[in-house]
Amino acid sequence: MKVTGGGIGALLRVAQRDTPVTMRLLVMSDTHVPKRARDLPEQLWQEVARADVVVHAGDWVEVALLDELEKRSRRLIGVYGNNDGPELRARLPEVARAELDGLRLAVVHETGPAKGREARCARDYPDADVLVFGHSHIPWDTVAPNGLRLLNPGSPTDRRRQPEHTYLTARVRAGRLEQVKLHALPPR
């Protein structure tokens, strides 16, 4: 093989640029710390350390968790929820939008009733590929008629009527969401 135009380093740079990057996502919501738990479960903190992007869909309750997630996350995307007071609302948006390697992500806490959710969210978020939401504490993974993927990770600390405390992980690669997995936490 003949190497020209910058040697092996140039070939490596081209190969790296042509290889799609995979981003690890951690998705959580409704943590309610410290009202429903003193802290996030250790398994979730381990996921934070592995994630390229941490997404939190609101109901933090106190600003200390936001501060700690900002310190420990490579990148944090979050919104405020209905249980979040003025200090959190001053630092977080109601709706967050981000582009992750070509994937258009929107995050909001509340989307309204389950009935009609897909059509309503497709109308309200026409420029998103994925919408992460919380509020119900009920895991949700559906696709609207326009292709919008709707994800709710449940809650890692307040399961309400659900059998388990939960969160989601996923991968983003070349503008696509892959390997979406709902994780159940061990009973406390």
Image: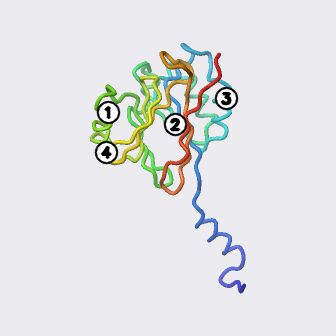
The dot on residue 55 is: 2
Q: Mark 2 against mark 4, which lies toward the viewer?
A: 4
How far apart marks 2 and 4 lie (CA) works out to 24 Å
- Disc 2 or disc 1, which is closer to the eye? 1
Mark 3 or 4: the one toward you? 4
Q: Rounded to the nearest whole Å, what is the CA distance between mark 3 and mark 4?
A: 35 Å
| Nearer to us: label 1 or label 3 | 1
Q: Which mark is residue 117?
A: 1
User: What residue lies at 54% left-to-right and 38% top-to-bottom?
Assistant: 76
> Which mark sits nearer the N-terminus, 2 or 3?
3
**How packed is label 3: few (under 14 Cα within 10 Å), some, or many (20 or more)?**
few
Element type where label 1 sits in the image: helix
- Residue at which label 3 appears: 43
Q: Which residue is mark 4?
A: 145
Quadrant in the picture for the N terminus = bottom right
Binning the other alpha carbons within 10 Å of mark 2 as few (below 14), some (14 to 19) or many (20 upward) gives many
